[in-house]
Image (cartoon, helix red, strand yellow):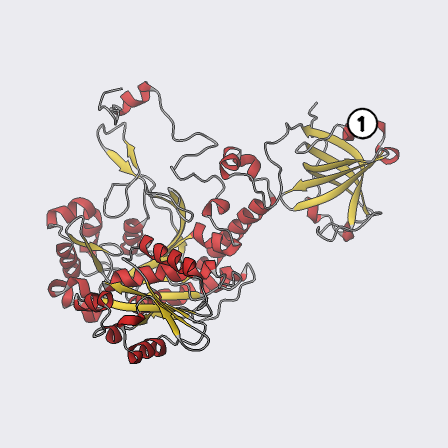
Amino acid sequence: MAESMKGLHRTHRCTEVSSDCIGQTVTVMGWVQKRRNLGSLIFVDLRDRSGILQIVFDENDAGHENFEKAELLRNEFVIAVTGEVTRREGAINEQLSTGELEIRARELRILSEAETPPFPIERNLQTKDELRLKYRYLDLRRPDLQHNLMLRSKVATAVRTFLTDEGFLEIETPMLMKSTPEGARDYLVPSRVHPGSFYALPQSPQIFKQLLMCSGYDRYFQIVRCFRDEDLRADRQPEFTQIDMELSFVDVEDVIDVNERLLAKIFGEVGVHVPLPIPRMTYQEAMDRYGSDKPDTRFGMELTDVTEIARNCEFGVFRSAVENGGTVRGINVKGQGAMPRKKIDALVEKAKEFGAKGLAYLSIQEDQSVKSSFAKFLSQDEIQSLVSTMGGAPGDLLLFAADQSQIVCEVLGHLRLHLADALDLVNKEDYHFLWITEFPLLEWSEEQNRFVAKHHPFTMPMDEDLDKLESDPGAVRAKAYDIVLNGTEIGGGSVRIYQNEIQEKMFEVLGFTKEQAYERFGFLLNAFKYGVPPHAGLAYGFDRLIMLMTGEDSIRDVIAFPKVKDASDLMSEAPGTVDQKQLEELGIQIIRQEDNEDV
C-alpha cells in the first residue's frame, strides 16, 4: 500500500522543527522509530538522520482515513506527515532537542512498508557484529553510526577548507598503478588488454605526490582511498582513507607547523582544544621512557633503566642479561604493592606473551619491608638503590624485565598499557598529542638478511648522519616524524631525498642494484633528472582519526561499509567467484591450493 509523494515537499528535517515553527504547517518525512496506540490517540516517534520528532494522530484532527492508516504503522515504515507544530500537551522529553514540541497530523502517507528488522534500530546496540554487518544498511540507520558518519563528513570538509586556504591544491592520483613490492602486500588487478600483466591498487599515492612536486604544484593534498592486503585488526581495514599531503621547498618545521594548525582546526570541530605547539619526543627517548614509538602519555608508569645497579648483582637473570649486552629495566605500578600473588603470576604470563622470558617483581610494604621474587640474591644496599631509582614508596609494585634492550622495552611498553587498562588509569576524555621524531632510517630484516627502509626508500637521512650511511647504516636517523594521539599513530611522514647521490646510496644500502631500482621506481628516478625541489609530506589515517574523535574502539564504526577480519563483506558477500568467461578473457586459471589441481 505504498503511496506516491506527488504533490508533497519536505519542508523540514525532524530536528529542524523548532519553537519558531509553532502554529505553522510543516511536512516531515522519515522512519517510524516507535508507535504507541492509546485508542483515541496514536503517538509516533519519527526518525531521520537529524533526530526524532513526535507526531500525534487524533482522529478529530487527522480524519478517519489518516487515523486508520496510522493504526497500520510499524517500526521502520517510511512515512510523510503534514501537520501543525504545537507545544506538547503531555510530559516534555528532555532527552530530545524537539522534546517540547509535536506535530498534530493532518495528512499521512505511507511511502514504504517494512518487515520487522533483525535487530532494533537504536543507539548502543549490543547485537553481534556479524549480524550488524550482514544487515549494514539497517545498522547505518542507528543514531550513533549516523553521528559518526556525519562527523566524518564534517571533518573532511574542514580539512579541505583549511588546506585550500593554506594554498594546497586537491589533485587526484591513479587507482591503477604499477606494483612496487616494498612494504605491505599489494592488491593486484589483472589486465585484459595486457594478458599476464597486472596493475596494483595503491598502498598510498607516495610516488605520484612526489612527481607532482617535480611538476611544480608546490602544495598538494588528497583525501584518498588506499589498499593493503594485510591481516586485519580493530584499527586496520584492507581499504582505508588517508589525508595525504606533500609540500615543496620545506623542511621538518614547515610540515609540523601546518599540521599542528590543521589538527587544532579539525579537533575544534568536536570541541577539543589542542594546545600548540604539540610536544615532541625523539624515537629513542620514546622507546627508553615508554617502550613504544607511539607512547600513550595520559598516564605515567614510565620505564626506568636499572642496568648499572643490576650489573654486579648476584641475581643471575639480571647479571647475565647485562653481560650479554642487554639491559634491565622496570616500571613502578603505584599503589599496587598489595597485589595478590595470583595476579602477579598472571602478569608474568602476560609478559611472556609479549616476548619476555620472565618478569621479576618487588612489592614495597607499608612498613617499608619488601616482598620479592629475587630479593634473596641482592644486598640491602642494592634493594634500596633499586627502590630509590624506581621512585618506589610504600604500597608500590616494581616490575622488572631483563633481556636485549629492544625486547625489554617492547615487553614493558606493552605491559604498562595492559596495566593501565586493567587498573583504569586512563581518562578517556583526555587528548594527548605528541610528535615522534628522528626515527631510524633503516631496520634489519632477519627474513631478508638485509636492511629495509623503516619508512620508505625515499626518506631523507638527517644531515649529521649522512656520513654513516655506508659505514654504520643502522645508526642513521631519518628526517621522519609521526603524530601520535593517546597511544595511536594517526599520521606520519618524512622529508624526501631529492639529491641523486643520496638516493643512489640509499638503494645500495637496501641491496638494490641500479637496474633493480629503475625497474621498480624508474619513472620517479627519471623525473628526478629534470630538476626536483626539496619536498616533504605527511599522511593521516583518516579512519583512525575519526575513531579517536568519536571514542569508538574500532574503525569499522566510522566506515560506512567495512570488511571483517578475513577481508570479506558480509553484506555484499565479497569477494566472490566470477564467470569462467571473465577468467578466460583475463587469461587466468584458478588452481586449488590443497591439491594443486586445475579448476
Residue lying at 11% horizontally and 50% vertically, measured from the top left: 514
> In this rendering, does residue 246 appear at all?
no
Residue 383: % across, % down: 32, 76
* The quadrant where residue 412 appears: bottom left
| Residue 165 rendering spot, x and y as whole percentages | 46, 60
Q: Could you tell me which residue is drawn at 41 percent across and 63 percent down?
A: 296
Compared with 404, 178 (above or below) is above
Image vertical order of residue 42 relative to residue 355, above or below:
above
- Quadrant occupied by the C terminus: top left
In the rendered view, does 339 fall on the left or right side of 5? left
Q: Residues within 10 Å of mark 1 (few under 14, many from 20)?
A: some
At x 21%, y 73%, the residue is 311
Would residue 158 be seen by someone viewing this image from the given angle? yes
Q: Secondary structure at mark 1?
A: helix
- In front: 135, or 546? 135
Indicate the amino acid at tag 1: Glu
Residue 241, above or below 467? above
